[in-house]
Amino acid sequence: MAKNTSKSKTLPIYIINGPNLNLLGAREPSIYGHTTLGEIEKLCAARAKSHGLSAVFLQSNKEGELVEFLQEARTAASGVIINAAGYTHTSVAILDALQMLPLPVIEVHLSNPARREDFRHLSYVAKAATGTIAGLGVNSYLLAIDAVAAVLAGPKGTRK
């Protein structure tokens, strides 16, 4: 179970990261940049705090663990930001878990999948997401936090 160490009254934003993202900074820096996942986590925590929110940052290389994070988010999070990485294009299980969430869901990608290989053009995550932010490197995550904060601050019923 994820642990929220912030004293924020609002439930945290879950930021969920899929396979191989633990190798950011070393893995194909020409596509994904030089920033590590740990550095992204620190930037996300600061951005969430600027909105009066907190973040729980999670990563797994295992599809089932990602599904478990999403199931936990149903009652433990105020919103979800997800970079499902390769599972974006293959996982019906992640889609099913996302469709159960009564929360804003923002899909993020460091690169722009639409400008890459054809198999990356299909996103199962997008079918359940409130919105998608891609191709802006680390800023994709930061803008996703801004988007979740805006949805949470806005009128009810703005999820989809």
Image (spheres, helix red, strand yellow):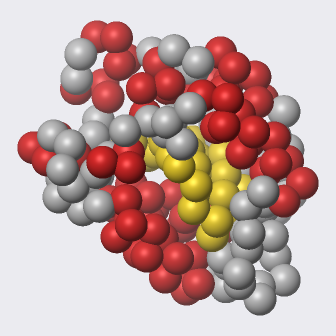
Position in image of residue 51 (x %, y %) = 61, 81
Q: Would residue 132 be visible to someone looking at this image?
A: no
* 49 left or right of 46 in image: right
**Residue toward you, 112 or 41:** 41
* 75 left or right of 153 in image: right
- Seen in the picture, residue 91 relative to 67 is either above or below; the reply is above
Position in image of residue 156 (x %, y %) = 86, 57
Position in image of residue 129 (x %, y %) = 63, 36
Q: Quadrant of residue 50?
A: bottom right
Furthest toward the right, the residue is 75
- Seen in the picture, residue 69 relative to 113 is either above or below; the reply is below
Which residue is found at the position 65% from the left and 15% from the top? Answer: 92
Q: Quadrant of the N terminus?
A: bottom right
Number of numbered discs visible in the structure rendering: 0
* 61 left or right of 155 in image: left
Q: Quadrant of the C terminus?
A: top right
Q: Would residue 85 be visible to someone looking at this image?
A: yes
Which residue is found at the position 44% from the left and 58% from the top? Answer: 141
Position in image of residue 97 (x %, y %) = 76, 30
Which residue is found at the position 53% from the left and 49% from the top? Answer: 59
